[in-house]
Amino acid sequence: MANTQALCTSFKVDAMNGLHAFGASVIRAATTKDSYKAALYLASATKDASTTVYNTTGEVSGTNYTAGGVAVTTATAPSSSGTTAFFTPSASIVYSNVTLGTSFDCMVLYNDTSASKLAVGVYTFTATTVTAGDFTLTMPTNNATTGLVRIA
């Protein structure tokens, strides 16, 4: 099978149930936003809209890569334009000095604050390997057209 880019269906339901806070939330009686992480997956994994939580099945492994991935910088609060709400991490996602010898082509963004590590989205890119280098996912412009997480 293959990885397929999609906003996770479970995320849409979770968002309606108030289980994600990309910005400070007073609705949930919290004053801080949730923490998010980005994990990388092998090209042979099967991550798609049906992905519900972070798990290690199909996750890459290698030198200087920690299971669960890396923290995502969320300094920019969610916004909207017209009928579309959007959110994009405020910095590129960087996996530093890694060696990942097996082909990978997917990142899963997930809520690390939630006990079950709720999935947000599956994002695909050209299959690659890395040898003793940084792997960087450059974030798109934070707007209603290209934002990483968009709900229209």
Image (spheres, rainbow, N blue to C red):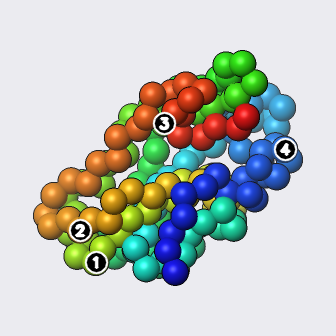
**Tag of residue 102:** 1
Q: Earlier in the sequence, mark 4 or mark 2?
A: 4
Category of crowding for the residue at label 4, using alpha-carbon neighbours closer than 10 angstroms: few (below 14), some (14–19), many (at least 20)? few
Q: CA distance from mark 1 to mark 3?
A: 26 Å
- The amino acid at mark 3 is Pro
Q: Earlier in the sequence, mark 1 or mark 3?
A: 3
Are the two marked residues, 2 and 1, in contact with CB atoms closer than 8 angstroms? yes
Q: CA distance from mark 2 to mark 1?
A: 6 Å
According to the picture, the residue beneath numbered tag 2 turns out to be: 129
Residue 71 position within the rendered picture, expressed as x and y whole percent measured from the top left: 44, 49
According to the picture, the residue beneath numbered tag 4 turns out to be: 16
**Tag of residue 89:** 3
**Tag of residue 80:** none
Instruction: Name the residue at 52% across, 33% down.
Output: 146
* Mark 4: secondary structure: helix
The reply to whether residue 52 is in sight is yes
Residue 147 position within the rendered picture, expressed as x and y whole percent measured from the top left: 54, 33
* Mark 3: secondary structure: loop
Instruction: Name the residue at 70% across, 28% down.
Output: 84
Q: Earlier in the sequence, mark 2 or mark 1?
A: 1
